[in-house]
Amino acid sequence: MHIENVLRASCIIWVSVSSSIIMTTTTEESEALQPYFDFDVPRNLTVTVGQTGFLHCRVERLGDQDVAWIRQRDLHILTMGASTYTSDQRFQVIRPEGSVNWTLQIKYPQTRDSGVYECQINTEPKMSLSYVLNVIELRARILGPSDIFIKSGSEITMVCVIQQGPHELGTVFWYKGNTLVEPLAQENDIHSGDRGRITIETDWTDALTSRLKIKRAIQGDTGNYTCVPTMARSASVYAHVISGEHPAAMQHNAAPSTVGHRTLRRSMCILLLLHLATLLYLLSDRCCSRRSGGQRNILQRPTASHRSARGAASGRRCETIVFSTHPS
C-alpha cells in the first residue's frame, strides 16, 4: 500500500512537471512567432507646408497580420494593409513587394496635419508605435521698410532672408511685377554699359539669404520686387527710383524721418486752436448781441461787473479775448 502511494505521487509530480514544460515551450514559441517593431527609425518628423512627408514603420516577422496607420486626434484609420481608408488622397501607404517597410506618405501637408500618428499591427492585443509629425510654415522677409526710395544713378540692394528649416530650402527667385529677374541676361546685353548691372547673390549659412543688386538705378527700375523661395512664402518690397532731389521722400533705403510727423502734428494743433477760437467767437458774439443791443465785437464774451441785486443784467460788459495760434 505504501509503495502504491509513492508511485501515485510520483506520477502526479511527473505529469505536473511535464505540463509546465509544455506550457513554457508553447509560450516561448508563441512569443517567438509574434511580430515586432524596429525602433531604429526616426519617429519625430518636421516638414514645411507643401513638402511631402514620410513616416517610416518597419515591422519584422509580420506573418499573416496587417499594418494600419491611425491618426490619433480623431482615431481615423488612414490606411489598412496596402489600401487607403480615407477620402483624403494626400495620404497613402508605400510598401514595396516583400518589404518590411510600411511608409505613410503625406502629400502637400498643411499645418493642420501636425500631430501624432500610430503604426498599428492587428494582433490581439493590438501593438502600436507612435510618430510625431510637425508641419511648419516658413516665411521670407525682406530687410528694411516695405517702400524704399533711391536716387537715380544709385545702387539698389534688396536682401531676402529665410530662416533655416528642417531641410534644404532650395533656392530663391526674384520677380519684378510678374517678370522673372534674370541677371544672366544682363551679361549678354547689347549695351556694354548695362552688362552686369543686375546681380543676384545667394548663400546658405544659418539662414538662406539672397541679395538682389541693381547698379546705376534708372526710373525704369521702379516697381514691385518679390522674393520667391521654393520652400517658403514670398515677400515683397516696392522700389521708387527718383530723379533729382526729392527731400520729402528720399531716404536712401532708410526709415522715414520723424520731421514730417512733427510738422503734421504742429499743423493739426494750429487747426484745432483755430476751430476752437471760431466756436468761442460765435458763442461770445451771440451773448454780446443780447447784452449790448446787437452791437458786435470781434472775439468778445460777456463778463459780469459789479453785480447788484436789482440790475445784474445792465451791469454786464464784453471783454475781448486774444488767442495765440502758436502751439506750445
Image (tube, grey):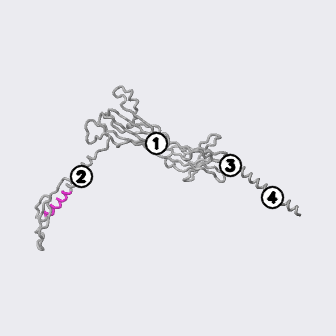
Tell me the CA gap for discs 3 and 4: 32 Å
Name which quarter of the figure residue 311 lies in. Answer: bottom left
Q: Is residue 289 left or right of residue 23?
A: left
Kind of residue sitting beneath label 3: Gln
**Secondary structure found at label 4:** helix
- In x, y percent, where is residue 3? 88, 61
Find out whether the residues at labels 1 and 2 contact each other: C-beta distance under 8 Å.
no
Mark 2, residues whose alpha carbon is within 10 Å: few (<14), some, or many (≥20)?
Answer: few
Which segment did they paint magenta?
276-289
- In x, y percent, where is residue 67? 63, 47
Q: Is residue 288 left or right of residue 242?
A: left
Q: Which residue is mark 2?
A: 268
Q: Which residue is mark 1?
A: 164
Tell me the CA gap for discs 4 and 2: 108 Å
Q: Label for residue 34? A: 3
- In x, y percent, where is residue 215? 34, 33
- In x, y percent, where is residue 196? 37, 29
Mark 4, residues whose alpha carbon is within 10 Å: few (<14), some, or many (≥20)?
Answer: few
**Total tally of numbered discs in the picture:** 4
**Secondary structure found at label 1:** loop
Task: Please name the residue shown 49% across and 43% down the image.
Answer: 166
Kind of residue sitting beneath label 2: Met
